[in-house]
Amino acid sequence: MKRIVAHELRKVMMSPLVLALLVLFLLYNAAMLITGYGSMREDMAESNRLVSQYGHQIDEEMLTRLRNDYQDELQWMNRLTMRTEGRTFENVSSLYESGNHHVEGSYDASERERLAKLLVMETYLRYIANIDPTYERLDPMKRAESEILKYGLHGELAETVRGHYRELAVRIDQLITNGEHKHLFFIGHIFKTHSLLFKTVFRTVLFEATILTVLLTGHLLSYEFERRTQSLMYSTKRGRSLMFDKTVAALLASLVVTTVLLGGTLAIYFALFDYTGFWSVPISNALQAEYSWPFISFWEMTFGQYLLASMALVYALALCFFGIASVLSFLFRNSYAVFCGFAVLFGICLLLTGIMPHDSNLLLVAGYTPSLLMMNSDFWWMEGGAFKSYRYYELITIAAWTVLLLASYALVQRRFRKQDI
């Protein structure tokens, strides 16, 4: 069995199509990050410098040091502008916003660099000052009613959503008590690093891994049928157990391509953007917020822990999609039909919530699909609206589909062993 699995694995991994797509996807991901977001690198480096100097915990001691250094630098700036322009500014933002002033033409490189650092300090102080007022205004039940009104929910479904947000209110109180929100991070309203990493990058990798997984699984499990050699191969000593060997090989190949895509793309991402000072920052920190409502994880997690949990979910989804492709391969025995069938099923799972009544919890149940889970990668493990307000959403989705796919595979495998080929 081991030799057969190794042979099948080598066969599919050496396929010119798989190798070409793997290289093409990695090149695309690198180009997307370098050309689309490379300009953010220097500004993000300033945030890292600030953390290395003051630490990421926002407390009175840290704020006192930051404010004192800011005032010292502001005095330096005004001495500089008084000498060059004959006037002072209330803050560095006013200097940059002055209509008749051109920083580039008036100051040398070292002065411009120092002014840029001062602007970063000022920006962080402004956002830090808004943390307490923002969290004092957070009202989970008001958000629940807004979500219910937004989607036109009523009946038992509306009550279920309200119940989820009551649980979220307890989590918010815990978050504030723990001080998870008071930490420095890349400012979400400016950099949008959470969406970049967990939405753009992770979703792109998942789409690519899914395409490769479905293609190689369909190709490997349908290989004998497409070449009309099934009568010969499945009459050998190994017999129809060969199909199980091919499934194991396809599983290993799926894990390999997912690892290469995810590992390669994340290596490029973290080579471009330095997160050195932020690995132990809570993911629910206030500065990371990109919208009026902040990111609130259902559990206390650091950025590093959240990243690892999300990577694990990528593998879980890749295995779910592999399972679907495997079952379809037993049914269709044609790689093109498998790919088309998978695309149709993926779309149906996305559209399923649109046909459910808005007064029944069946609408929530219909949302527990790998397709929707994949499309909401930026809200994994955290609150993300009416349909993403239950803390065990990810775990239930993966567990339910794992059981479903294992049962389905057992049925089609049993059927395959008995039917004429």
Image (cartoon, rainbow, N blue to C red):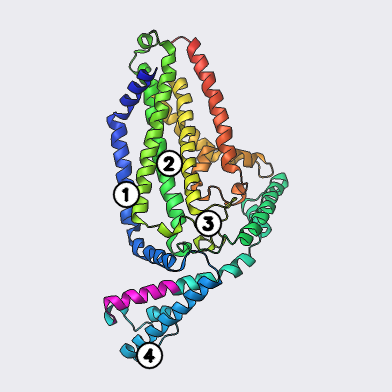
First reached walking from the N terminus: tag 3 or tag 1: 1
Q: Kindly identify the amino acid type of the residue bearing the numbered disc 1.
A: Ala
Q: Real-space Cα distance between discs 3 and 4?
A: 42 Å
- Residue at (65, 53) in percent of width and height: 168
Q: Kindly identify the amino acid type of the residue bearing the numbered disc 3.
A: Pro
Q: Which quadrant is the C terminus positioned in?
A: top left
Q: Tag 4, which secondary structure?
A: loop
First reached walking from the N terminus: tag 2 or tag 4: 4
Q: Kindly identify the amino acid type of the residue bearing the numbered disc 2.
A: Leu
Q: Tag 1, which secondary structure?
A: helix
Magenta span: helix, strand or loop, mainly?
helix
Q: Badge 1 is on which residue?
A: 30
Q: Are marks 3 and 1 in contact (CB under 8 Å)?
A: no
Q: Which mark is residue 206?
A: 2
- Residue at (45, 75) in percent of width and height: 122
Q: Badge 3 is on which residue?
A: 282
Q: Kindly identify the amino acid type of the residue bearing the numbered disc 4.
A: Arg
Q: Which mark is residue 12?
A: none
**Between marks 3 and 4 in the image, the one whose residue lies nearer the viewer:** 3
Q: Tag 3, which secondary structure?
A: loop
- The x, y position of residue 114, in whole percent, is 34, 76
**Magenta region:** 107-121
Q: Real-space Cα distance between discs 2 and 1?
A: 15 Å
